[in-house]
Amino acid sequence: MEDPQQQQALQQSLFRVETLANQLYNSPNTEERTQAEYSLVQLSQSADYIPQCQYVLDNSSQSYAQLVAANALRRLVTQNWNNSTAQQRLDMRNWVLNYLATNGPKVEGFVSSSLVQLLCRMTKMGWFDEPVHQGITDEVNKFLHASPKHCVIGLSILTQLVTEMNQPAQGRSLTQHRKTASSFRDLSLLQIFQVALNTLQSLHSGSVTAQDTLKLQELSLQLALLCLSYDFIGTTFDEASEELGTIQVPSSWRSLMEDQTTMQLFWDMYLSSQPPHSSTALECLVQLASLRRSLFSSESQRAVFLNRLLGGVLKVLQSQAGLRSHDNYHELCRLLARIKANFQLGELVVAECYSDWIDLVASFTIDSFQHWQWASNSVYYLLSLWSRLVASIPYLKGDASSHLEKYVPQVTRAFILSRIECIRAALASPEPQDDPLGDEDQLTEQLESLPSLCRFQLTQASEYIVSLFDPVAQLYQQLLTSPPADAAATALRLSQCEAELAWLVYTIGAILGSHLTPSSNPETQQLIDGELSGRVFQLALLTDSTVGMNARYRERTNQQLELSMLYFFGQFRKVYIGDQATSSSKVYQYLSERLRLNDHLAVLSLLMQKVTGHLKYRHECGDLTSKTLALFSELAQGYSSGKLLLKLDIVHGILRNHTAAEFPFLSVPSNGRQRTAFQSMLTRLLFSESEQASQFAQFMEPVREALDRLCEAAQRGDAFMAEGMKQLVIGTLRDLRGICSSCNNRRTYTLFFDFIYPAYTPLLRETCMRWYHLPAVTTPLLKLMAEVVYNKAQRLTFDSSSPNGILLFRETSSLLCAFGERILAHDVPEGADIYESRYKAIGIALLTLQRALSGNYVNFGVFALYGDNALSDVLEVAIKLCLSMQLSEMLSFPKVAKTYFTLIEILMRNHTSTMVQLDTRVLRHICSTLQEGLKSHEVSISSQCAAAIENLAVYHFMHAAEGERTEAGRRLAAHLAAEPTMFQGLLSTLLQIIVFEECANQWSLSRPLLPLILINEHFFQSWQDQLIAQQAATPERQTKLANAFQKLMTDVQCNLESKNRDKITTNLTLFRHEVKALF
């Protein structure tokens, strides 16, 4: 009998939950809903509320109150699973099953769904704890053989169970997940799949008649699909990628998969049902088409299976059944693509109905291309199918005909023409998303598959492309040179010509780039390449030479045409310009005869004219600028093409004059990154020719003039703060960073260092002091300093008698101190983005210091020896900057977090004595951040935190025994007196990760373990005793866990010698192996 007072309390709680749930879901008052949500959240905060949630579910008649209680119960049981006894878990499981059996058909679907999720979660978490959990299918069978509504609940349980078992659970390791998922696969999955098939068979035969027939059909199909999509071997196959993937069904499924009724059932369900059920049936067939080859008992069985599959597709294509539905249409296209992905062409051509099948598939594909509005999302799969078919031709053996030579040209022509029609329709549509040239991802997908189709019968394909290209190009030239009187009609026709030419140029570029080297092409194909390329080059000359083109620069179609030519140039460069290309290629013979482009140099000259034209006159189009610079970068980075570029006068002109006045795109604020990349590219070109000081000085002359102007303005005070000066500062800083980034050896870096120091470093410091509050200035300034102090490729190697390393660090320290002191005193403007206005600059400043400290070009002992405060001052400012950042905010910005933890690791490694001298509160804060960093899923951050903790713990172990005799001993004693749990918290977190979580960096985490244990021996013993005591409900597990901890410390001595530390690292591997089998 329950206590009357307890009963009354539960009734009052029931009334309160019902009231709050009603407010949460029905109140029009936002504040009232928020308050109700906050109050109801308390239900899921403690396991003490579990009886209350059960009482609400048992006694409330309000569905929203039931939902709140069910959700809270699910969270409570999940969160407190390890703290509950085996009997409590079984009692909860039985209660949920009884509730679903008794009340499931009566409550709302969302309530039963929440409880189904709870049941499946409990089943997964307790799979290896109690055998009863592995018998869940027997319990569900009782639902399946009861009323139709109970059958719906039973199928819902199985559907949710397969879903739950197939996805990792939060708080459980991947190893635990795979162990459970594999056991479930072996014990229950086949039985569940047979339940789905049996239910579908009953529904199809009409032996089940109920109001819930559609729901049963939906759940059965969904369950079958989930079973076939199960991650059988832990490969986590990415369905979205549509890459070649096979379904690794266990061998125990063989007889079921080979049974003709299995596949026929899904075809029957497709033909007899309506969307979305019919499309789910097709999805199941897509999975069946991907069964692994080794599953079948023989090749003849696999051939029979393929015949059934092709026969089903043939029947659908002949009757067009269900293809008026977009979802069905799309899934059929996926099925066609998957058939070829999983079966070889040699297997297809010997199939009984192959001739009819390929004929109907070709007609279906052509029809799909012609009605592109209907099948726009399915084009990729059809292209993939035909591309794979063509790619298999060289490997086809035997006398059976593939008939591809008949259908591939038709498919190719249909696709190219459909894209042109699509472009015409897009010009007439006000919606920009309808533009196929504007969707770069879709365009890339199509250009990957198209070349193989074109090259299958290149002569026919090229003739068709030329037949489309020439009339449009002639019309385009005519409209540009002799425009009609009607300006509006002319502009529309020009836009149409540009868009159509853009698609054709993309197609030609894709064909050229689809082979590896010119020598791999027969001379006939090279002549065709030359013919196609010549037309594009002729078009490029037309667009550069025509006076009327200036008026077209702002038109989107004109920009698309230029983008397509850039794509073509990039593909042409890969094959016909460079180390493997030769000027004797038939392509150059054709270009020489028609356009007087005799060799690589002539073509490169044309390309550079196009590049400089874009950078000078089309700076308002960001896409065009970025793609132009990408092409320029490819040319400059290639060894052969880079050498050829330096033979062109136009390139030397750029090297002499690379200012914003000559290239207006440099002045566009949004082109900041491109400006840096541009200067880096030019510097790389310069140094590839010569590293002479005179040539570098000539190259730097425009930058020197800009810096001199800024120095003069800085001396005049207010003039330096003008908007024009600010833009000049930003641009010059970006230029300097780009130039410095390409100084990749000692010689070139010394040239840059001598240029900037000591003449212009005071200007950088002055800039920081004046503009510290503006991220637009501080970001490029600090990035420049981070690049200057970066010792990549050992470029900062000065002579033994040179003080440059020390001088560089002093300048860096001075600038960082100036920035840090001012930014700490500056408040973030209200409503400003905290990252952009503060954290980003602080992160770059810490990165600069990190690089300076780890560059190995400064002997930091010199500063203390000669009383120079450069090191101590910058470290003090850096610590203040670190303390100014909220830990939660810093961790939400990955770049800042990674820089912070890297810097702390360097300080703990190389400047431990300085860190120990910090105030206890500061050191405690740093240790708490390291404790949080240990938990990071970013392996690099976790490893750096472990290394930092190791260095601090080792320092403590080595110096704590000194006591009052040394300054280090006194400081350590003071820290521990004020914060006695500082190291205990670190050890607790480390042990928690090692015992319960996945450790991709186990070696790194093992290194701080021994020093932490040695300085916290009593805490370590109490922590393991507490963990062992928590396993009292399972004595066997308790014994194994105690033995594992004993083995961890076997043969480990109380010292930090290398041999001893390696021993605990070895022991830890065995310890984790044993512990993972327990949890």
Image: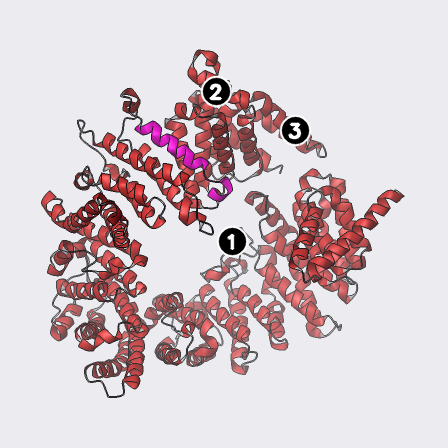
Real-space Cα separation, disc 3 to disc 1, in angstroms: 37 Å
Which numbered disc, 3 or 1, marks the residue that appears first in the sequence?
Answer: 1
Magenta residues, start to end: 870-890
Determine whether the residue tagged by mark 1 lies in a helix, strand or loop.
loop
**Residue 321 in the figure: left or right of residue 374:** right
Q: Give amino acid for label 1.
A: Thr
User: Residue 269 location, x and y as percent?
Assistant: 63, 73
Q: Which residue is mark 1?
A: 236
Q: Quadrant of the C terminus?
A: top right
Whether 25 is among the magenta residues is no
Determine whether the residue tagged by mark 2 lies in a helix, strand or loop.
helix
Real-space Cα separation, disc 1 to disc 2, in angstroms: 49 Å
Real-space Cα separation, disc 3 to disc 2, in angstroms: 29 Å
User: Residue 4 location, x and y as percent?
Assistant: 89, 44
Which numbered disc, 1 or 2, marks the residue that appears first in the sequence?
Answer: 1
Pointer 3 local density, CA inside 10 Å: few below 14, some 14–19, many at least 20: few
**Residue 201 in the figure: left or right of residue 59:** left
Q: Give amino acid for label 3.
A: Gln
For the question of whether residue 94 can be seen, the reply is no
* Residue displayed at 47% across by 21% down: 956
Q: Which residue is mark 2?
A: 972
Pointer 2 local density, CA inside 10 Å: few below 14, some 14–19, many at least 20: many
Which numbered disc, 3 or 2, marks the residue that appears first in the sequence?
Answer: 2
Q: Which residue is mark 3?
A: 1026
